[in-house]
Amino acid sequence: MGGFGVASGNSGYVALVGFDSVPIKRLLPDFSNPAFLEFQGAGLISRNETQYPFHIHLRWHFISRDNWALYNFGGVGAVIRPSDSPLFSIRAGWGWLWYFGEFVALRLELSPDFYGAGLLVRGWD
């Protein structure tokens, strides 16, 4: 994903956010909505310095339609800054995905330690 983001109160351009999602099919068998274990890493280029937020969280689509989804997530995260010690945090928030192509989506995400918006290119088999 490339776009705009804010990490630890510093805004900047997100050069690249890498996601790897692993579907969890039988975590909650009574729910039909998808759930994923997601790993996320980014490079945030700001005026002051470059930061590197990393997160691991569980993402659950509580509303999922053909071309969009609302989701919430919870997990742990860290923001690594070269000029200071890493900032570790518990991560919880929500987001929105809008798929407007087979492999392209708009992703918005809000949490206390990182929020951003950008284009997401989905992987393919």
Image (spheres, helix red, strand yellow):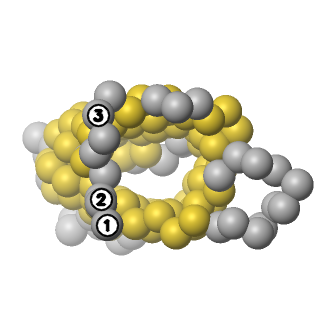
- Cα separation, mark 3 vs mark 2, equals 12 Å
Give 99 or 125, whichever is nearer the viewer. 125
- For residue 36, side relative to residue 85 (left or right): right
Crowding near the residue tagged with mark 3, few <14, some 14–19, many ≥20 C-alpha atoms within 10 Å: few
- Cα separation, mark 1 vs mark 3, equals 16 Å
Q: Secondary structure at mark 2?
A: loop
Q: Residue at x 31, y 66 (%)?
A: 125
Give 34 or 42, whichever is nearer the viewer. 34
Q: Residue at x 38, y 33 (%)?
A: 99
Residue 45 at what x, y percent from top left? 15, 48
- Kind of residue sitting beneath label 2: Gly
Q: Residue at x 15, y 49 (%)?
A: 15
Disc 1 target residue: 125
Disc 2 target residue: 123
Say whether disc 1 or disc 3 marks the residue closer to the N-terminus.
3
Residue 16 at what x, y percent from top left? 20, 53
- Kind of residue sitting beneath label 1: Asp
| Residue 115 visible in image | yes
Label 2 close to label 1 by CB (< 8 Å) = yes
Residue 70 at what x, y percent from top left? 59, 33
Label 1 close to label 3 by CB (< 8 Å) = no
Displayed quadrant of residue 112: top right
Label 3 close to label 2 by CB (< 8 Å) = no
Which dot marks residue 101? 3
Say whether disc 3 or disc 2 marks the residue closer to the N-terminus.
3
Which dot marks residue 79? none
- Kind of residue sitting beneath label 3: Gly
Q: Residue at x 60, y 53 (%)?
A: 59
Residue at the far left in the pictured view: 47
- For residue 25, side relative to residue 38 (left or right): right
Q: Secondary structure at mark 3?
A: loop
Displayed quadrant of residue 105: top left
